[in-house]
Amino acid sequence: MAKVVIVTGASRGIGAATARLLATRGYAVGVNYRTRAQQADEVVAQIIAAGGKAVALQADVSNESDVIRLFDETERALGSITHLVNNAGGLFAQSRLVDIDLERFNRVLQTNLTSCFLCCREAARRLPAGGAVVNLSSVAARLGAPFEYIDYAASKGAIESLTKGLSTELAGQGIRVNAVSPGLIYTDIHADGGEPGRVDRLGPSLPMKRGGQPEEVANAIAWLLSDEASYVTGSIVDVAGGR
Ligand code: NAP
């Protein structure tokens, strides 16, 4: 089976690292982005320069018609989709729950959770037996992210529920659904939260005494997608330095 994967939110960070790694493992990669076209084009250029196959595809994955278009365009460009990585996500400035307004709360749920639901639904409609999905959760799902972003933590908790439920619905069709739960990873998401140096501040307090690199998360995603994880479904794999 030719392997074709969509990686949502692959213009930077964990998504970009995952797109690059999967290309080296023989996947044709749909590099989805929302706003950063130039960075997505650079990821595609790196993949092609290394002998891989990829296309950049703009879509806001929290929007239903964008998601359907993303899957259609990927199929036209690369062939039938066999794998999906629901990586797109985001958060806003660190804040206590008491100060989070409804618009922000709804935006966080839409960006993280609605996007995961929409892409999972499209995958459930289209993936063949032998296909696999990996969703990006966060250790925030079990820690709750107090004083920082409870809205984000709640969206990730819901992604874990969705992962468990869908894995059971699709197991009989030979499609596996798992999640990776990163801890503190060096990406620009922390600057979006208002603290670019957050990983350096908190990394030393972890059992492994450091933050993680996007490539270390990508390795876990690639394993879960692969046949090496053929008996793994409904699992949440922590990539969090021991926390
Ligand atoms: P990042 O560097 O901020 O990158 C986020 C990516 O998501 C960007 O490519 C962005 O695209 C894309 N995106 C956001 N909203 C989108 C939408 N509506 N439609 C399409 N693309 C969208 O984030 P990251 O740190 O790599 O995180 C990746 C995933 O891992 C997220 O789900 C995050 O919650 C999770 N995670 C990260 C950490 C960490 O410490 N970094 C820890 C736990 C979990 P554009 O830039 O093109 O807009």
Image (spheres, helix red, strand yellow):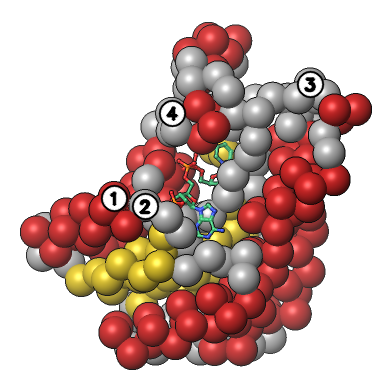
Q: Residue at x 26, y 53 (%)?
A: 38
Disc marking residue 2: none
Quarter of the image for residue 124 reads bottom right
For disc 1, does the CB lie below 8 Å from ligand 1?
Answer: yes
| Sequence-first tag of 1 and 4 | 1
Residue denoted by label 1:
39
Say which amino acid is labelled 1.
Gln
Q: Could you give the CA–CA distance between mark 4 and mark 2, rounded to whole angstroms?
A: 19 Å
- Nearer the observer: mark 1 or 4; the answer is 1
Q: Residue at x 58, y 50 (%)?
A: 89
Say which amino acid is labelled 3.
Phe
Residue denoted by label 3:
147
Disc marking residue 186: 4
- Nearer the observer: mark 3 or 2; the answer is 2
Disc marking residue 36: 2
Work out whether 67 lies above or below 243: below
Say which amino acid is labelled 2.
Arg
Residue 130 lies left or right of residue 17; in this view the side is right
